[in-house]
Amino acid sequence: MYVAQERRAYILRLLQQRGSIRSAALARELGVTDETIRTDLVDMQKQGLLKRVHGGARYILPLPGQSPPESAGVRLDYQLVQLALRHIQPGMCLYVDAAPLAQVLISALGECPCSLITNSPRLLARLTAGVLPQEIICPGGRIDKVSGLLDSPEARAAMGTTLQPDIALLCPPALRPEQAMYAQAVRAAWATLAAQAARQTIVLTPAHHLGGSAPHATPLEDYLLITENNLPPEFSGRQVEMVPYISAEDVLPGDAFDY
C-alpha cells in the first residue's frame, strides 16, 4: 500500500467537499508533519489537481472543453463522472443540474455529440466561453434571485413537452432514498420536472451527501445512484454504482511504505 497516494486521494476528496483546505489542520487530522502535507500539495499542483494558496489549497473546477488531467483517475469527481459516462450515448439529450459535478461531467464528455439542457446562467457562461461539440439548450425565463436560475411557467412547461431529456443528471447537496434535497425551491422544482420528463434519472453525489437534509425535496422513484462505497443501510437494495471510499482512518501513519 502506498500511503502517500491514498493520502492525496483523501486530500482531493476534502477539497471537493469543502472547496479549500488548511495545511496545518490537515496535518493534525492525518497525524503527519506540515512538511509532508506541503510536499503533497506541491506535487498535486504540478499534476493540475489543485491550486496552492497561502496556508493550504483550493479545489480546481475543470473548464468545459478542457481535457482532464492525466491524474484525473485519483479525483473523486472524475471517478464518479466516469461511471455516469457509461450511460450516455451519442445523440442523447441531458438535463444537467446546476452543480460543480455537472461541469466536471461536461468537461469529460469530450467529443461525444449530445444535447445539454441547463437553466443556470453561470453554467451557460462557462459552456459558451469556447466551442463545444455539444448542443446547448436553455429553456429561458427570468432570473430567480434566490437560486440564480432562469425560471418561468413557459420554460417549465417546455421540459415535459418539447425538451424531454433522455437523462436527468441530478447532483443534489443531500439525498435520501426517495428524495433529492435542495436548498432552493426553484432548483428542486426543476429537478422534479427533469426527473418526471426523462427516460432515466441518474443521481451523482459523494457519500457525505447521503442521508443529509435540505428544505426542498424532489421526489425520486426509479433512479441510478452513483456514489462511493460507503452506503448508509437505508440505501441498500437501490440500483447503485460505486467508486472506492477513502476515510481519514485509511491514511493514518502506520508501517506501510510511503514515498
Image (spheres, rainbow, N blue to C red):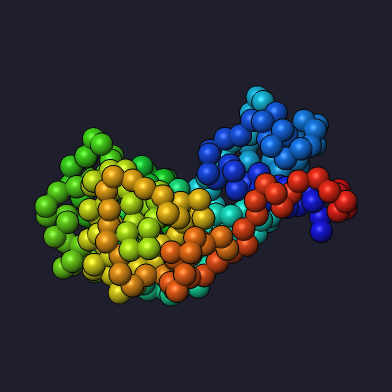
Q: Residue furthest top?
A: 54
Q: From what the image shows, is residue 147 above or below residue 103?
A: above
Identify the residue shown where x is 71% and y is 43%: 44
Relative depth, front residue between 87 and 223: 223
The percent position of residue 86, horizontal first and vertical second, equals: 50, 73
Q: Residue furthest left?
A: 153
Quadrant location of residue 178?
bottom left
Question: Is residue 103 something one can see in this rendering?
Answer: no
Quadrant location of residue 171?
bottom left
Q: Quadrant of the N terminus?
A: bottom right
Identify the residue shown where x is 33% and y is 72%: 222
| 235 left or right, relative to 60 | left
| 123 left or right, relative to 74 | left
Quadrant location of residue 230?
bottom right
Question: Is residue 126 something one can see in this rendering?
Answer: yes
Identify the residue shown where x is 79% and y is 51%: 3
Identify the residue shown where x is 30% and y is 74%: 199
| 127 left or right, relative to 144 | right
The percent position of residue 235, horizontal first and vertical second, equals: 44, 65
| 174 left or right, relative to 186 | right
Q: Residue furthest front?
A: 233
The percent position of residue 203, horizontal first and vertical second, equals: 41, 62
